[in-house]
Amino acid sequence: MQLADIGANLTHAAFRDDLDAVLARARDAGIAAIVVTGTTLEESRRAAALAQAHPGLLHATAGVHPHHARECGPETIPALRALVAQPGVVAVGECGLDFNRNYSPHPDQEQWFVAQLELACELEKPLFLHSRDAHPRFAAILRAHRDRLPRAVAHCFTGEREELRAYLALDLYIGITGWICDERRGTHLLELVREIPRDRLLLETDAPYLTPRDLRPQPRARRNEPAFLPHIARRVAQALGRPAGEIAAETARNARELFAL
């Protein structure tokens, strides 16, 4: 089974001491490509450096997560423009809105989401998108840019049917994580995943976060990593009533198309 993990936070401190071993386990598990998520300018620089150090396996995004929107300023977009031009950087993001934690004020989040969205439109680069408790405002902002919107993925989708259908109407790809393995919060995804067209479904770990709750044994400190993506693929396959190998092949193909890997 060959898979693509379209969202892993490999610059996180949780991987500081054993990243090489993490990557070796990912390869052994059949992970052919990993997109390393950029969440701030500094983390985006580190993600780009990782992609350049591990060509072929690692790729990177460059963006500012809505949690950090209040830290943005005049240098942000020029710096992101330069990062996106670097080898191995395949998308703008992680960008969007997060009205759950509200670490940055809503006006700041919207301002810098739009700025990054416009950068992606200008450069015709894919978008790696974040939305939490921000529907329908998030979809409305995307809709306002509909005529120029590049390829984009709603990363780590955990929403309800109305939100999913709004994103599919915008031709977004949908990223499914280990949330689908959570019997407390994710059971609705077992049904909703059936509504995602085959050519729009993507898989991701969001490592080190969102460790599948039904993974046995649970990893030390509950740290998620790309090697666990086959477990998520099997859960999605079970929900769809299809072989896991087919899901792996289709989602890997979708990742290659979205990010031009």
Image (spheres, rainbow, N blue to C red):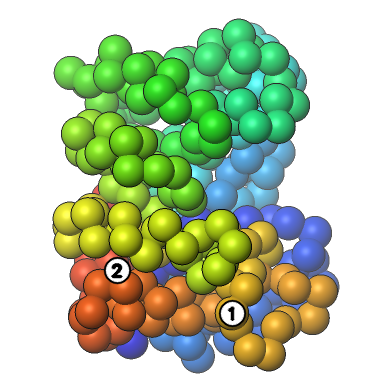
Identified at 78% across, 65% down, the residue is 14
Find disc 2 in the rendering and name its residue: 252
At x 30%, y 83%, the residue is 244
Which quarter of the figure has residue 124? top left
Circle 1 packing at 10 Å, graded few (<14), some (14-19), many (20+), is some
Residue 235: image tag: none
- Does residue 77 sit above or below 218 in this rendering? above
Q: Which residue is mark 1?
A: 214
Quarter of the image where the C terminus is located: bottom left
* Quadrant holding the N terminus: bottom left
Image position, residue 247 (x, y; %): 26, 75
Disc 2 to disc 1, how far (Cα)?
A: 23 Å
Is residue 260 in view from this perspective?
no
Q: Which residue corresponds to the image point at 28% horizontal and 19% vertical from the top-left?
A: 143
Q: Position of residue 78 (x, y in %)?
A: 54, 19
In front: 58, or 28? 28
- Badge 2, how many Cα within 10 Å: few under 14, some, many 20+? many
Is 121 displayed left or right of 33 in the figure?
left
Q: Earlier in the sequence, mark 2 or mark 1?
A: 1
The amino acid type found where label 1 is placed reads Asp
Q: Secondary structure at mark 1?
A: loop
Whether residue 222 sits left or right of residue 4 in the image: it is right
Q: Label 2 sits on what residue type? A: Ala
Q: Secondary structure at mark 2?
A: helix
Q: Residue at 38% of width from left, 17% of height from top?
A: 141
Horizontal and vertical percent for residue 85?
43, 37
